[in-house]
Amino acid sequence: MAIYRLSMTKEFWEDLRRLPPAVYRRALEAGARMWEDPWAKELHPEKVKRAQEQDIYSSRVDQSYRIIWKHVKHTEVVLLLVDKHDEAYRRAARKRFILEGGVVKVVDTEYIRPAEVPEPAGGLFGWFRRQKAGALFMRYTDQDLLDMGVPREALPHIRSLEHEDDLPLVEKLLPEEVYFKLLDILTQPELPTVSDSALRESLERHQGGEDLYRFVDSEEFKRALRGDMEEWMLFLAPHQRQLVNRWYNGPARVKGVVGSGKTVVAVHRARFLAREALKRGGKVLFLTYGNRLPGVMAHLLRRLAGEGAPELQAVECCTVHSWCYNFLQRRGQTPVVDAQALPAIAEQAVAEVQSRYPNLSLWRYPVTFFRDEIAYAIKGRAVASREQYLALERSGRGTPLQESTRQVVWEVYERYQALLRAQGLWDFGDYILETLKELESAPVEMPYVSAVVDEIQDLTEATMRLIRRLVPPGPNDLFLVGDGLQRIYPGGYALSKLGIDITGRGTLLRQNYRNTHEILRAAHRVVAGLSFDDMDDQASEAPEPEFSVRQGQVPILRRFATPEDELCWAMEEIARLRTSNGYQDRDFVLLYRWRKPYQDLIETLLPSQFPEVQMVELQRDAETYFGPGVKYSTFDSAKGLEFKVVFVLGVTDGLCVPRDDWNLQGEELEDYLARERRRLYVAMTRARDFLYLTCSRGQPSRFLNSVPPEYLQRV
């Protein structure tokens, strides 16, 4: 008996969700039967005679609706669409399969007539006089052209073109990369016929293709039919799918612009590696930095694989620090961190050392400088001795320190450690260092054959050294994901200097899928030209993203008298968007750089002013993110997450974004401002559809000065 494998186009998936409920149920039954046997008599399979593509068939859903599918010999079935009888056959006649870069793509060859070309008023493009649509791009729909990056306002002109020689006449209407993309399309040969063997090989290798998904098993297919799976679980861009399913001979690195799908790729990759790990009796370690992300990642993995899927048992999702805590406990140690006590302990250490050297200019720096130096320069680099610290290259710290000054800073560090131990306390950097010591003194055989590490830009050098120890070198050992432009903590490192060689296994994702064109334009201008450390051997500048084809409202900046006014206006706007756009409370988030005064006001003012709205602070558990209620959080806690509507509160210059610190100057000030600029960029790019910024008691942040009026509406 033949065992069939099914694939589904995104078009079929979207068709299903438009069916009337009764037809939908029958379509599910027919789809489930096709997995068992697409030739079953009760499905009434028949060949579509007018189809351009070979082996296109129809199966009956009921008297009115048909499923259209392709048989790829011998046992592959691709579900193409489902529609009413006549329309289903008409659409079926247009379908063709092609290979682009070895990946299957399903194309529509019929020309859909666009809107009439408007009569221009003359000028440079006054030659566009004909109302009849041209033949040059008749194989492509309007949406195809928009997806290629053609501006909507240029569509009528593109549609008017008859011959290849006409294309240069619209060059000035198009971004340079779009013009050359259209030129490449015109020079490509006509669509070739693709053999079944080539289609089958591509489906197997890439688990589908562009807008095409090949199901792992029948249970996954049934989950998709029931609606238990979402679009991100099924349809990845071809370059994303290749990253997920690629076999690497060593560590791989994926970096990319904000909203380019890095986390989605990481989740899919973790599942792919887990299936491989099960064959070897091993596990996959999925690590993140932020303590809210492991719960989110575990939730997404469960949604992707399905509750009870075997591969879930082979994946361990946690933060680096929680992994270290559990490991140290198993080794007989009891780490205790009192986060509220740490600032006072650091202040005491500084005061005690200062009393011995009262006249040093070093003391003009705030206590936070010493805390950061200990966390990122000393513990973050796993510096074990005074001599190592004196010779340390302190890249990413911004403040140059002479040897005599470092001697004193080292004394502050030693005193700080002594005070911690006297109180039986640790800080989070100790988790990493003590774990490294344990593994170096008494190595332990780990169960992990692979690790997926997200947000690597926020990890320290010591943390990356630890991760390298947890997974033995080999094929598919480390899959590292991150964006140096979103780094918000001091310090930095180069992967190559840690023995992590990604030569030939690095990928940059440029296409933004999350934000509207307008939101990303505004956010990108905040960091455009900013130099940053991207875990390479040299400084990088913010790459120009491929902007989203989704259009939307220009972000809005509003000024108010008080923070209370900011919050009340935000809540009124939330109520308006719920009514006008159909959003739910969980689609909104309020973000702020500092907890005071905004979190205090949210928790005290809003319950009395807006008792009908449930406010939820983002916590470690995934429920606070995926569950009901308007969310609120700091910029840092929202990293890695996204929301349909974002309110960035308190972007007031000097008070919050950035908060001026008159102790900083020179390189240290530049480093601080660069990190604060990146923080605002991260907050702004959490927004998918709408972005609002508010400020009060001062001028808007200086970081917004670089955003031109056409990208930011100032009210």
Image (cartoon, helix red, strand yellow):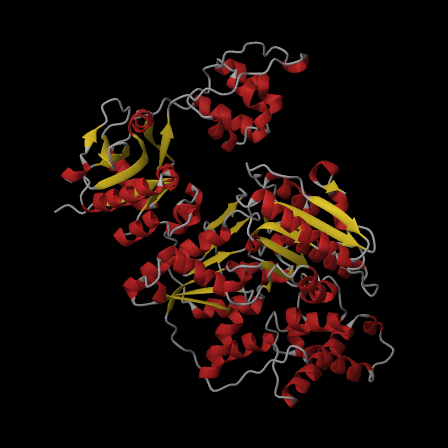
The answer, for residue 499, to whether it is visible in the render is no
Count of residue discs: 0
- Give 122 or 602, whichever is nearer the viewer: 602
> Which residue occupies 28% across, 37% down?
199
Residue 713 vertical placement versus 703 (above, below) = above
The answer, for residue 457, to whether it is visible in the render is yes
Considering every residue shown, the one lying at the far right of the view is 359
- Would residue 703 appear left or right of 441 to someone viewing this image? right
Residue 188 vertical placement versus 228 (above, below) = above
- Give 419 or 570, whichever is nearer the viewer: 570
Considering every residue shown, the one lying at the far left of the view is 1
Residue 307 in percent (x, y) is at: 35, 62
> Which residue occupies 65% across, 90% down?
422
> Which residue occupies 15% across, 45% down?
2
- Give 577 or 247, whichever is nearer the viewer: 577
Residue 268 in percent (x, y) is at: 41, 54
- Give 633 or 547, whichever is nearer the viewer: 633
| Quadrant position of the C terminus in the picture | top right
- Would residue 617 appear left or right of 184 to someone viewing this image? right
Residue 235 in percent (x, y) is at: 40, 44
Rendering quarter of residue 12: top left
- Would residue 703 appear left or right of 73 to someone viewing this image? right
